[in-house]
Image: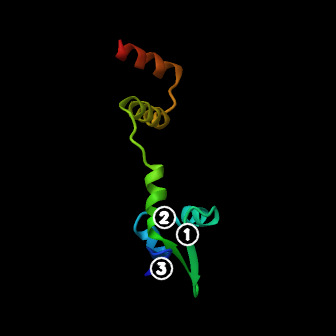
Amino acid sequence: MSANANNVSYSYICVKDAVERGFGSRVTIMRWVKDASVRSFRRGSFRMVCVEDLEARVASRERVITEDELVERLARQIANAAPVLSPEGKEHLARLLR
């Protein structure tokens, strides 16, 4: 569906379709509607949201991460997934890493 304001055409989809297209969760999309960063209107029982605004919001969240940031993020994930070691286990691991 398209709407026209000031001779600019915008495409609108329902929130369910926006979620299915991967723009974000329903909660996230509705938060964007509430903070007015995504235009919307009601059509019967459906909330229609502006595709161009969704694309802009998603693009603003995405950024290129540096290699150092990626290594740090992966190291945190590995550390968080590691089992808790006993003192003996820590000692054994230290010997293996020497």
Residue 91 at x, y percent in the picture: 46, 16
**Residue 6 position in % (x across, y down):** 50, 74
Q: Amino acid at mark 3?
A: Ala
Residue corresponding to mark 2? 53
Which image quadrant is residue 21 in?
Answer: bottom left
Q: Which residue is mark 3?
A: 3
Regarding mark 1 in the picture, which secondary structure is present there? loop
Q: Are marks 2 and 1 in contact (CB under 8 Å)?
A: yes
Q: Nearer the viewer, residue 24 or 80?
A: 24
Residue 39 is tagged as 1
**Closer to the camera, 17 or 36?**
36
Quarter of the rendering containing residue 94: top left
The tag earlier along the polypeptide, 3 or 1, is: 3
Mark 1 burial class by Cα count in 10 Å: few <14, some 14-19, many 20+: some
Q: CA distance from mark 3 to mark 2?
A: 13 Å
Is residue 84 placed above or below 3 in the rendered structure? above
